Amino acid sequence: MPESYDVIVLGAGPVGENVADRAVQGGLSAVVVEDRLVGGECSYWACIPSKALLRPGEARRAALAVDGARQGVTGGLDVSAVLERRTSFVSGWDDAGQVEWLESAGIDLVRGRGRVSGTRQVTVTGPDGGERVLVARHAVAVCTGSRPVVPDIPGLRDARPWTNREALETQEVPESLLVIGGGVVAAELAGGFADLGARVTVLVRSTLLSGYEPFAGERVGAALEERGVDLRLGVSATSVRVDGDERVVECDDGSTVRVSQVLVATGREPQPDLGLESVGLEGGWLPVDETLRVLDGEGEPVEWLYAVGDANHRSPLTHQGKYQARAAGDVIAARAHGRPVDDGRWGVHAATADHLAPAQVVFADPQVAMVGMTAAAAEEAGLRVRVVDHDLGAVSGAAIHADGYTGQVRMVVDEERGVIAGMTFVGAEVAELLHSASIAVVGEVPLDRLWHAVPAFPTMSEVWLRLLESYGRPHPA
């Protein structure tokens, strides 16, 4: 007989966990279905292990950038210790702790591959091949994330390239590594493996970090080159073949690169075979309304079906997915209990920040931290924009933080409303500056009020005062 729950969640990553948790806190029963590790991509093959891998090199460079400390740095990284530290953060790829958390939160777990098999129905194929049918009284939430794209380059698949998963599971550092791609994963892991001693080449089809302010990719690229990375912009791989222990990569500029390993970092794609055709929907990225309900072919919401996180492709970042998940879990509970739904702009059941204030960090060195819109995106959206730039290295707090500190900050102002539409920081350890900008953007804090938010001296946050001075203080009427 089918097993019944109020909510069925496909995927036990951070997004699925949060949907289920909020639904349970709202008085509903919930089960999550997962065929891999509870905790998902972020916990084991992305955010957590990558940042753990990158931090030792960043910390070493931070010490070398301060006179008096640099003299005490007498060696390079201990590669074995770096890899062991990375492994400790993923609990040796053991999800027992995450399973324990599910149990403590009152959430059931079913191991296996889940597919939608009818209205409010999910069929799970377990590890032993047996099937279980689950039926939702109120909602099914697709929180299956995404998977890395392996481009259709002749010979590439036969060369068994790494994706982020294999790169972050590795127990050995290759002598040489070719990275194909120019996004966040490419920028971060190129630097990380260079720190660990690999000879790294990066092929970027267009520009590095193309979705960010142009100076972000320029500064990160220059820093990678300073660390010995061979960065080739406007170059693509055309074929790959295996020659003994090496991969031989032919490029469209006529060059050939011979490396020990190839890492593919060319984007993500939706998880396949979710069974959505059983309810008249197509696969791929799932369009949703502001409360994360899936939209059908006519643009109407499917009342019982939600897509949260990467599955809807609105803002494919772990923290934004968890933000969506809180809204989705809460609204599922509200609808189940017949309570009002607050789905207006900035409503508690709406994922407004996906459009207007997504926050993101590239953990390269220098870091790139951004919230809201770039100047180009704001202009494309029809805003009357004024851009204010400032040299972060000229701020007293940054100069004390590191000798010769270099960085840049851009404030994008919506002139009609007198509020900030976007901020970008580039520099060492600027990620910790980002949330102040997120609050200003989400809160739509007028610039004349920001004058009264006084940054402490001497900190890097003093850049806020310098940006406001450059913009100009308002005068009383």
Image: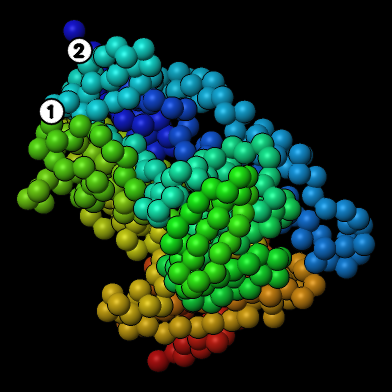
Question: Looking at the figure, which quarter contains the C terminus?
Answer: bottom left
Q: Residue at x 25, y 34 (%)?
A: 273
> Which residue occupies the foreground of this view, 172 or 408?
172
Q: Amino acid at mark 2?
A: Pro
Q: Residue at x 71, y 35 (%)?
A: 84
Q: Which residue is mark 1?
A: 119
In the rendered view, tell whether residue 222 sits above or below residue 71: below
Q: Secondary structure at mark 2?
A: loop
Query: Tag on residue 2?
Result: 2
Q: Residue furthest left?
A: 298
Query: Tag on residue 371?
Result: none
In the rendered view, tell whether residue 417 sits above or below residue 312: below
Residue 48 in percent (x, y) is at: 57, 42
Q: Total marks drawn?
A: 2
445 sits to left or right of 431: left
In the rendered view, tell whether residue 395 sits above or below residue 314: below
Residue 457 in percent (x, y) is at: 71, 71
Q: Residue at x 57, y 85 (%)?
A: 469
Q: Amino acid at mark 1?
A: Thr
> Which residue occupies the foreground of this view, 157 or 162?
157
Q: Residue furthest front?
A: 243
- Residue 316 appearing in the image: no
214 sits to left or right of 111: right
Question: Looking at the figure, which quarter contains the N terminus?
Answer: top left
Distance from Cα at disc 1 to Cα at disc 2: 13 Å
> Which residue occupies the foreground of this view, 297 or 201?
201
